[in-house]
Image (spheres, rainbow, N blue to C red):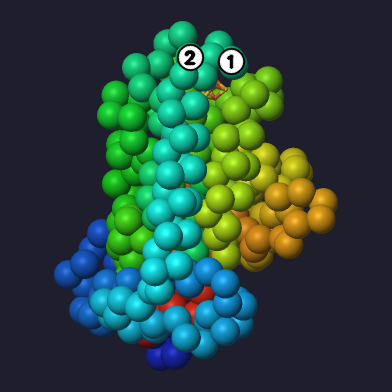
Amino acid sequence: MFHETDPQRIIRTLTGQLESDLFLGGRWLPIGRVETVQTPTRPTGITRATKMTTAPKNVRETPQLSNAQIKIIEEKRQRLTEIAEKVTQCRLCQLHSQRHNSVAGEGNPDARLVFVGEAPGQTEDEQGRPFVGRAGKLLTNIIDAMGLKREDVFIGNILKCRPPNNRDPQASEIAECINFLYEQLEIIEPEIIVALGAHAAHTLLNTNTPIGQLRGRFHEYLPHPFAKPIKLMATYHPAYLLRNYSKDNRLRVWQDMQKVLQELKLPIPGK
Ligand code: SF4
């Protein structure tokens, strides 16, 4: 039963529910048109501040890239392909023995935004692609509701091979595998990393703080002690969200993603 009588609170509550429903696939909800925003491909060689003032803020506005910038992006793509080839050959940990496919990750080699999950599941192992199962569909919905496309971002995992029965990654497996992700992040140089779930957040932030306390605010991922930190938003893993499909959890993730969009100076659909 809905007993709230304050009109402002009713509007706030309903708006929050509608927004979180929207990113979970309820695109029919009349809270505003969701427009696909081309995540600006990063022009390399200019400062971040300059980039943000020149970045296209609106729909399907494709940035003009110089030949030098296109060349840099192609080099990044080539380097990521080389890492994927190394992953395919990798036998550093026991997980190689049961994999059908390794899953190196995929997406924009020059992405401003990178999503990092835990490890491939069954569907990912079968297809060799990240986040294509049920949880992956939810992640795609989330990206879609952010006004982005999967091709705009890069999607990867801490582990590149599926643990048996989707068990948690072991510390020794992470230790063997993590350099692949570190290298990918070094090449892509994203502005923001979204760590999906506790394993990704704990590994990248080197902490054991519960995900419920980490989520909702930006942290700093330090590629190495002298590197410039990259902002990291921790949030719930889509698989957790599916298992705990409450309005509150959906709203929490949607609020986290709104902060990411704000930080990237991209429009928030429906606002
Ligand atoms: S999980 Fe990583 S370290 Fe282990 S075999 Fe696969 S690619 Fe290699």
Residue 219 picture location, percent across and down: 70, 60
- Of residues 128 and 43, the one nearer the viewer is 43
Q: Which residue is mark 2?
A: 96
Q: Is residue 170 left or right of residue 73?
A: right
Q: Which mark is residue 93?
A: 1
User: Is residue 243 in sight in this rendering?
Assistant: no
Residue 156 picture location, percent across and down: 47, 42
Q: Height in image: 214 above or below 204?
A: below
Quadrant housing residue 143: bottom left
User: Number of marks in the image?
Assistant: 2
Residue 68 picture location, percent across and down: 45, 67
Q: Is residue 49 left or right of residue 57?
A: right
The residue positioned farthest toward the top in the image shown: 97
Q: CA distance from mark 1 to mark 2?
A: 6 Å
> Considering the numbered disc 2 on the image, is that residue within a helix, a strand or a loop?
helix
> Considering the numbered disc 1 on the image, is that residue within a helix, a strand or a loop?
loop
Rate crowding at label 2 as few (under 14), some (14 to 19) or many (20 or more) other CA atoms within 10 Å: some
Q: Is residue 35 left or right of residue 222?
A: left
Q: Height in image: 220 above or below 205?
A: below
Badge 1 residue CB within 8 Å of ligand 1: yes
User: Is residue 54 in sight in this rendering?
Assistant: yes
- Of residues 249 and 111, the one nearer the viewer is 111
Q: Which mark is residue 158?
A: none
What is the three-letter code of the residue carrying label 2? Answer: His
Residue at the (62%, 78%) spot, across then down: 47
The residue positioned farthest toward the front in the image shown: 67
What is the three-letter code of the residue carrying label 1? Answer: Cys
Quadrant housing residue 20: bottom left
Residue 109 picture location, percent across and down: 44, 53
Asked if the residue under mark 2 is in contact with the one under mark 1, i.e. CB atoms within 8 Å, the reply is yes
Badge 2 residue CB within 8 Å of ligand 1: yes
The quadrant the N terminus occupies is bottom left
